[in-house]
Amino acid sequence: MAISDLEKESRISMDILRPLGISIDAKTGELAIKKEIWEAFKTLAEIGVLTFVGAKILEYLSEEEK
């Protein structure tokens, strides 16, 4: 638990995830995520999935040639 003065008004919340852009308001229990960070995370996840699928396809094709 922490008291944050980073916002316009002080609020009591769990700020341990604040550097990641994630904040949980202790009074309401609301989870807030900065949109820019969430979009960056989704983009990285998509790149990871595409890379994994591409590697599996190449692995399958190389095994098929042998």
Image (spheres, grey):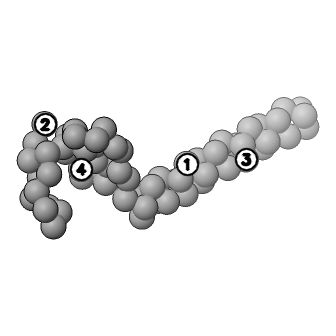
Q: Position of residue 17 (x, y in %)?
A: 26, 44
Q: If the image is split into quadrants, where does the C terminus sit?
A: top right
Helix, strand, or loop for circle 4?
Answer: helix
Residue 63 placed where, x, y %?
A: 84, 32
- Answer whether labels 4 and 3 touch (C-beta < 8 Å): no
Circles 1 and 4: CB distance less than 8 Å? no
Tell me the residue that label 2 is attached to. Answer: 1
Horizontal side of 48 relative to 6 (left or right) equals right
Q: Mark 2 or 1, which is nearer the eye?
A: 2
**Rendered-image quadrant of the N terminus:** top left
Compared with residue 22, is residue 27 higher up or lower down, i.e. above or below?
above
Q: For the residue carrying disc 2, how many other residues have a C-alpha within 10 Å: few (<14), some (14-19), or many (20+)?
A: few
Mark 4–mark 3 Cα distance, whole angstroms, equals 34 Å
Residue holding disc 4: 18
Which residue sits furthest bottom? 8
Q: The residue tagged with tag 3: helix, strand or loop?
A: helix
| Residue underneath mark 1 | 45
Q: Residues within 10 Å of mark 4 (few under 14, many from 20)?
A: some
Residue for point 90% across, 34% down: 64
Q: Position of residue 61 (x, y in %)?
A: 85, 40
Relative to 39, is 24 on the left or the right? left
For marks 4 and 3, the one nearer the N-term is: 4
The amino acid type, in three-letter code, at marker 4 is: Arg
Labelled pair 2, 1 in contact (Cβ < 8 Å): no
Q: Which mark is residue 54?
A: 3
- Which amino acid, by three-letter code, is at mark 3? Gly
Q: Position of residue 31 (x, y in %)?
A: 35, 44
Q: Which residue is at the front of the view, 48 or 22?
A: 22
Q: Please state which amino acid type lies under the numbered disc 2.
A: Met
